Amino acid sequence: MSHSTEDIKARVDDLFPGIRKDLEDLVRIESVSADPERLSEVEKSAEKTRDLFAAEGFDVEIVRAFDGAPPAVVGEKKGPEGAPTVLLYAHHDVQPENDHADWNTPPYEPTEVGDRLYGRGAADDKAGIAAHIGAVRALASLDENGDLPVTVRLFIEGEEEVASATLPELLGKYQDKLRADVIVIADSGNWDIGVPALTTSLRGLIRVDVELRTLGHAVHSGMWGGLAPDAIMALVRLLNTLWDENGAPAVEGLVSGPAADVDYPEERLRAESGAIAGLEWVGKGSAVERMWTQPAITITGLDAPKVDGASNTLAPSARAKVTIRIAPGDSGENAVAALQKHLEKHVPWGAELTTKVVDTGEPIALDATGPAYDAARAAFTEAWDGTAPIDMGVGGSIPFIAEFLDAFPQASVLVTGVEDPDTRAHGANEGLHLAEFRRVVVAEALLLQKLGSR
Ligand SMILES: [Zn+2]
């Protein structure tokens, strides 16, 4: 039995105070996975998550890759015979709140101000957990037997904010409990207030430490300057070759692709980036191409003598961290090779080049077609009163998505979420837009119902 969109919206409205209370209880737990002092809080958030889903009729447990590993919550509520299986993902750990003085409200006391509920994890990603709870609660409460239209499985991770170190192991160890036809990853966001999105592409990255040496030791700049090149001079000249005159990447062999035809309004770009007045953008192509489907090269660190106290010497060596966001279609291996070749070709004056690959993360382009995507687009459009979702790219990476694609290559992966341009995930004053959150819950309930009626 299928319920009308209006019935589902009305039921989510009725249940909303309870869904919000569950979210607030989760936010009060300081589950900072990066803080060794608060690991007991990460355990508490796992227990609270387990208990919340147990109350919805899930068969649910806390699991770990090995003794002492971070706690994940795995569960299932069976749907009708023959119905598809949907795996719901979120994470219950949070980023550190950092300096409390930067917050306008206490980070672990959820506080409503204006349209938003503020608190660490209020969006990223405890609202993902709450959206899953809200969707299954609404559907079960509309069914006379409390049943769901599909088999729902859960995977609520406790180490996403510390790079999901044991995730591959967990996905392997519990694959029989996690396998699904559709995986809903609620850890991204929507395009804007009132405009939903599905996240369909993500850039990867490589980080390479580049060191140049020109001298065996520092020498007097008055005596040797003008003849011997110092390492900073050589490094500056080398780094300058990484971009063309527009600031677009000039490393041959990096992959670029087309982006969705999305207009990112200039005012939003300026406001959200904090660009100073009169700043010119770099690169070529549409704004979203430059941010989502083209590579970007950034120097994220430099080692050279400090300005204060600098002596009159030629620096013998200097180092930079070169970070390249790589576009969908590229690979870490290709980008590292392209960068290496470029650097070798452009090293000036016979300087000695040393490179060290710090890490690589692969880009992702999801196959955003097929019945699960059709169902999601219809569900989002109904939840947002007729506004269809856009296919959004994300300039950064969510490395764990690749782990799911590897572990379950047959599944359709939908990347959704509660964030909006002003969420400030990971920053001070993280906040959830409550009206949008309600739509997210409605959309997920509609999606599960549509997947069940296929
Ligand atoms: Zn997250």
Image (cartoon, grey):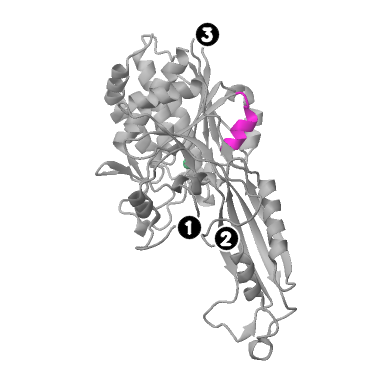
The answer, for residue 64, to whether it is visible in the render is no
Q: Are marks 1 and 2 in contact (CB under 8 Å)?
A: yes
| Residue behind mark 1 | 282
Q: Are marks 2 and 3 in contact (CB under 8 Å)?
A: no
Earlier residue among tags 1 and 2: 2
- Per the picture, the main secondary structure of the magenta-coloured stretch is helix
Location of residue 349 with respect to 382 vertically, above or below: below
Q: Can you tell which of label 3 and label 1 is closer to the viewer?
A: 1
Which residues fall within the magenta stretch? 401-410
Q: Going by the image, does 103 lie left or right of 332? A: left
Q: Going by the image, does 235 lie left or right of 1? A: right
Splitting the image into 4 quarters, where does residue 385 fall?
A: top left
Tell me where residue 306 appears, x and y as whole percent.
55, 76
* Amino acid type assigned to the residue bearing label 2 in the image: Trp
* Amino acid type assigned to the residue bearing label 3 in the image: Glu
Q: How far apart are the alpha carbons under marks 1 and 2?
A: 10 Å
Q: Residue at x 53, y 44 (%)?
A: 293
Earlier residue among tags 3 and 1: 3
Q: Which image quarter is the N terminus in?
A: top left
